[in-house]
Image (cartoon, rainbow, N blue to C red):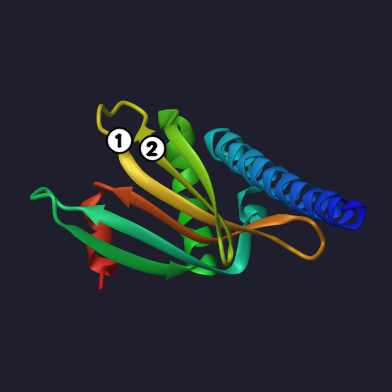
Amino acid sequence: MKKLLSILVIFGLFIFSGLKAFADDAAEAKAFFNSYVNAANTYSPSIPSFYSPNAKIIRQVVKPDGSLANAYTNTSTYMKQLKLGQATAKIRKYKNTYRNISVEKVPEGYIIRAERQPTGETYWLKTYQIVQKQPNGQWKIIEEMMQTKEQIFLKYAK
């Protein structure tokens, strides 16, 4: 009986430590997302450091009829576009507000889903990021999808 009880206690400790590690990583992933939002909303030059060099970037265009089209790009191209757009965004004081933020474990890391509201708009758009903890302990965005109503992205849609 003592042996069985000892095994159960040890097993319980392993499960508890595993759940604690999961909770810690989920909290770190959310903190990383919050840091990203702050950097983006303050037009920080550190934005490229949040992304993996080979991240999958998706802009999902919401067409006027409500249908969707996906425009894909790579990290390098996205960073060039971001740099061009940041100056205008700063002048316009453009920011995004996020709500309904959720964090979920996925095979690649953690998926952070949210709704995003651009400055001056009344609508909310879906977004997600898949973030992954790197061997050096840093978090990186390895995939990002943001919905947009900007129809100019349709020329890149597949």
Q: Mark 2 Cα within 10 Å, few/some/many (few <14, many 20+)?
A: many
Q: Amino acid at mark 2?
A: Arg
Q: Amino acid at mark 1?
A: Trp
Describe the element under mark 1 as helix, strand or loop.
loop
Q: Secondary structure at mark 2?
A: strand
Locate residue 76 relative to residue 98 in the image: left or right: right
Measured as percent of width and height from the top left, residue 10 is found at: 86, 53
Q: Is residue 75 left or right of residue 151?
A: right
Residue depicted at 25% across the width and 55% down the height: 61
Q: What is the residue that sits farthest to the front in this orientation?
A: 1
- Residue 130 visible (yes or no): yes
**Pick the front one: 113 or 68:** 113
Residue named by callout 2:
116
Displayed quadrant of residue 52: bottom right
Q: Residue at x 43, y 40 (%)?
A: 88
Q: Is residue 31 above or below residue 156?
A: above
Mark identifier at residue 124: 1
Give how far across and how far down residue 96 sits, in percent.
43, 34
User: Going by the image, does 42 lie left or right of 78?
Assistant: right
Residue 32, how many percent across, how many down? 65, 44
Q: Are the residues at dot 2 and dot 1 in contact (C-beta closer than 8 Å)?
A: yes
Relative to 123, residue 67 above or below = below
Disc count in the image? Answer: 2
User: At 66% from the left edge and 39% from the top edge, which residue is drawn?
Assistant: 31
Hey, which quadrant is residue 49 in on the image?
Answer: bottom right
Q: Marks 2 and 1, Cα distance to the nearest angstrom?
A: 5 Å
Please tell me which of labels 2 and 1 falls first in the chain: 2
